[in-house]
Image (cartoon, rainbow, N blue to C red):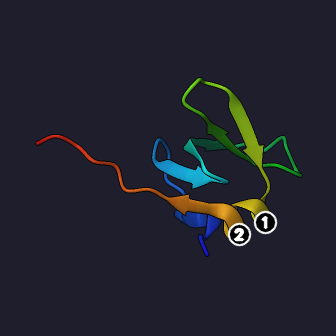
Amino acid sequence: MLSTTALQRNHLYEFRGQQLRYSHQSNCRVNAPFVFNDSKGRRKELSQNQVQREVFQLQEFREN
């Protein structure tokens, strides 16, 4: 279970088999305050329950 406070901006996460990059927390959206972007730049807004149950952090590989 992922805590919503553990989300880090510009880190890669997985939601229902789709890779998403965490953008920011929106103050204007009560039902879906967590904003993610997919690889095509499309915005996806998720609720706190969705984040806690279905979002997993992915480890990114970087070249040295």
Label 1 sits on what residue type? Answer: Asn
Q: Residue 49 carries which label?
A: 1
How far apart, in angstroms, are the residues tagged by discs 1 and 2? 6 Å
Q: Tell me which residue sits at (67%, 26%) in the image.
A: 42
Label 2 sits on what residue type? Answer: Arg
Quarter in which the N terminus is drawn:
bottom right
Task: Give percent across and percent down for residue 44.
Answer: 72, 38
**Disc nearest the viewer among 1 and 2:** 2
Rendered position, 38 above or below 1? above
In the picture provided, is 52 more to the left or to the right than 10? right
- Circle 2 packing at 10 Å, graded few (<14), some (14-19), many (20+), is few
Task: Give percent across and percent down for residue 4.
Answer: 63, 64
Residue at image mark 2: 53
Q: Tell me which residue sits at (60%, 24%) in the image.
A: 41
Could you tell me if the residues under marks 1 and 2 are in contact, i.e. CB atoms within 8 Å?
Answer: yes
Q: Residue 28 carries which label?
A: none
Residue most extreme to the left: 64
Task: Give percent across and percent down for residue 13.
Answer: 53, 52
Residue most extreme to the right: 31
Q: Tell me which residue sits at (60%, 34%) in the image.
A: 38
